[in-house]
């Protein structure tokens, strides 16, 4: 009769403790908001999905490590968990900002508002738990055994996530060649970055018949230059001789274009830092 082996370090290590806190906090935030019944619309749906998705996947990760089943999976476990912890931190952070700005109103003196405020505070603590996991699992300088746990790998997750946020804000860009170019930049860089993440988790990068590190450096340089053009072109065509409407609400096109502008700057800076770190990693490996 086969005995079940338990890896208790999945629960007692610092990473395991951070994951347990993340499970508890994400479930609590989800339950508090669900109890209010006020989470309609795309923003509320996104926040509920973020808390529920992060809770479910983190619980699955803990169970797979507890019962030592993860070696049977055809993927790089360290890369997967590092990428997911970074993604979860970004998703929970977004929810912690979006939910109160959309659903909490002043004065906050009703029981529903109190629960919404409590859910926001718990969501912020959940973000800290995932951020702690990212810090604990991040690769030490010079260690490249798990690419997605290095700074360039974590930046890849950040870049793909920011691109998704940009896509969610796009509305009117037809018949404007400059804006169409920017959308093409967002799409091309997102697809390539996502493929890098998927191939890394699936252990497929070793089959690429070329020096991968140098290809990544070249891609980061190209993506940075493409985003640089978008940083200049997008606001020029979006706000040229256009002032903010007086009745501009959350779904106002002007506000969405402003959000895309800031997210474009964030991704440009991310690709710039990614290029610096990737070049440094290649240089260190070459010397060693």
Image (cartoon, rainbow, N blue to C red):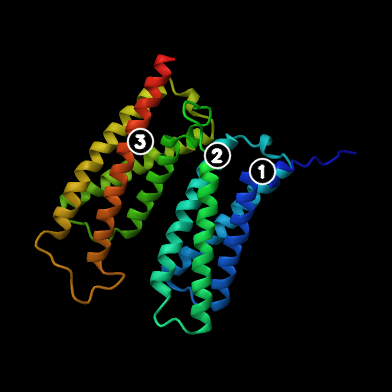
Q: Are marks 2 and 3 in contact (CB under 8 Å)?
A: no
Residue drawn at point x = 40 percent, y = 49 percent? 161
Residue drawn at point x = 55 percent, y = 57 percent? 53
Residue drawn at point x = 24 percent, y = 73 percent? 248
Task: List x then y, in percent, for residue 123.
Answer: 51, 62
Number of marks drawn: 3
Left or right of residue 116: residue 21: right
Mark 2 vs 3, N-terminal side:
2
Q: Which mark is residue 13?
A: 1
| Circle 2 residue | 137
| Above or below, 70 relative to 173 | above
* Marks 1/3: CA–CA distance: 30 Å
Q: Residue furthest bottom?
A: 110
Residue drawn at point x = 52 percent, y = 31 percent? 146
Q: Nearer the viewer, mark 2 or mark 3?
A: 2
Q: Nearer the viewer, residue 142 or 233?
A: 142
* Marks 1/2: CA–CA distance: 12 Å
Task: List x then y, in percent, for residue 174.
Answer: 21, 57
| Circle 3 residue | 274
Q: Nearer the viewer, residue 23 or 168?
A: 23
Q: Secondary structure at mark 3?
A: helix
Task: List x then y, in percent, for residue 47.
Answer: 48, 64
* Marks 2/3: CA–CA distance: 18 Å
The answer to which quarter of the image holds residue 30 is: bottom right
Q: How would you rate the neighbour count of disc 2 (Cα within 10 Å): few for under 14, some for 14-19, many for 20 or more? A: some
Q: Secondary structure at mark 2?
A: helix
Q: How would you rate the neighbour count of disc 3 (Cα within 10 Å): few for under 14, some for 14-19, many for 20 or more? A: many
The answer to which quarter of the image holds residue 185 is: top left
Q: Is residue 181 visible?
A: no
Q: Secondary structure at mark 1?
A: loop
Mark 1 vs 2, N-terminal side:
1
The answer to which quarter of the image holds residue 226 is: top left
């Amino acid at each position: 009769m086969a005995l079940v082996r338990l890896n208790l370090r999945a629960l007692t290590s610092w990473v395991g403790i951070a994951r347990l806190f993340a499970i508890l906090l994400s479930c609590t935030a989800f339950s508090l908001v669900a109890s209010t019944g006020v989470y309609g619309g795309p923003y509320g749906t996104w926040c509920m999905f973020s808390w529920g998705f992060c809770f479910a996947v983190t619980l699955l990760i803990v169970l797979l490590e507890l019962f030592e089943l993860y070696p049977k999976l055809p993927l790089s476990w360290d890369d997967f968990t590092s990428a997911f912890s970074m993604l979860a931190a970004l998703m929970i952070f977004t929810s912690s900002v979006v939910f109160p700005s959309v659903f909490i109103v002043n004065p906050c003196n009703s029981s529903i508002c109190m629960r919404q405020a409590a859910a926001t505070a718990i969501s912020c603590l959940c973000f800290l738990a995932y951020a702690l996991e990212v810090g604990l699992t991040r690769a030490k300088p010079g260690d490249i055994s798990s690419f997605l746990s290095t700074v360039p790998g974590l930046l890849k997750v950040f870049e793909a996530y920011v691109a998704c946020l940009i896509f969610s804000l796009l509305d009117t860009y037809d018949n404007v060649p400059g804006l169409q170019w920017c959308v093409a930049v967002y799409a091309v860089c997102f697809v390539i970055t996502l493929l890098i993440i998927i191939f890394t988790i699936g252990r497929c990068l070793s089959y690429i018949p070329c020096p991968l590190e140098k290809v990544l450096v070249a891609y980061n340089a190209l993506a940075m230059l493409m985003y640089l053009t978008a940083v200049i072109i997008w606001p020029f065509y979006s706000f040229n001789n256009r002032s903010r409407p007086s009745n501009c609400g959350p779904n106002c096109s002007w506000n969405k274009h402003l959000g895309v502008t800031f997210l474009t700057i964030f991704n440009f800076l991310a690709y710039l830092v990614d290029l610096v770190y990737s070049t440094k990693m290649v240089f260190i490996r070459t010397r060693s």
